[in-house]
Image (cartoon, grey):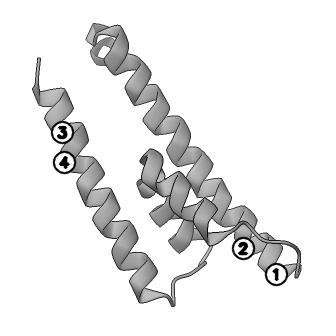
Amino acid sequence: MQWFLSLGLIKQLFLTYIIAINIIAFFFFGLDKLKSQLHSRRVSEKGLWFVALIGGSAGALLGMHFFRHKTKKTSFQIRLALILLLQIVIILSLFKQN
């Protein structure tokens, strides 16, 4: 906790955003899986991509594997992994700059 409080306000807000968007992405995959099982109107693939692209790729990958949703779509997994890698590089570069 001390580490978080020692960060500047912008970095605190950014980190809070990243955590929140990943939780949302995780639950989007769970919601889409549930809706597919109920034969209900699903979360669009564009919606799943969007939440991953705006910072939720780690939550999306975790949700995909936890809910066993879209795991047979290798291209989907590879793209998500590449987005996650890019986001990790960006986040690390932001936090290295003091």
Real-space Cα separation, disc 4 to disc 2, in angstroms:
30 Å
Type of amino acid at the residue the image marks with label 1: Gln
Q: Is residue 1 visible?
A: no
Real-space Cα separation, disc 4 to disc 1, in angstroms:
36 Å
Task: Return the mark for residue 89.
Answer: 4
Task: Return the mark for residue 92.
Answer: 3
Tell me if label 4 and label 3 are in contact, CB under 8 Å: yes
Real-space Cα separation, disc 3 to disc 1, in angstroms:
38 Å
Q: Position of residue 87 (x, y in %)?
A: 29, 49
Task: Return the mark for residue 33.
Answer: 2
Residue ID for mark 1: 37
Residue at horizontal 35 percent and vertical 15 percent from the top: 10
Real-space Cα separation, disc 3 to disc 2, in angstroms:
32 Å
Asked which quadrant contains residue 8, the reply is: top left
Real-space Cα separation, disc 4 to disc 3, in angstroms:
5 Å
Q: Position of residue 34 (x, y in %)?
A: 79, 71
- From the image, which quarter does the C terminus lie in? top left
Assign a secondary structure to mark 4: helix
Q: Residue furthest front?
A: 46
Which of disc 2 and disc 4 is earlier in sequence?
Answer: 2
Residue at horizontal 29 percent and vertical 67 percent from the top: 82
Looking at the picture, tell me which residue is in the foreground, 79 or 65.
Answer: 79
Residue at horizontal 57 percent and vertical 53 percent from the top: 25
Q: Is residue 54 left or right of residue 66?
A: left
Real-space Cα separation, disc 1 to disc 2, in angstroms:
6 Å
Type of amino acid at the residue the image marks with label 2: Lys
Q: Residue furthest bottom?
A: 72
Mark 1: few/some/many CA within 10 Å (<14, 14-19, 20+):
few
Which of disc 1 and disc 4 is earlier in sequence?
Answer: 1
Type of amino acid at the residue the image marks with label 4: Val
Which of disc 1 and disc 3 is earlier in sequence?
Answer: 1
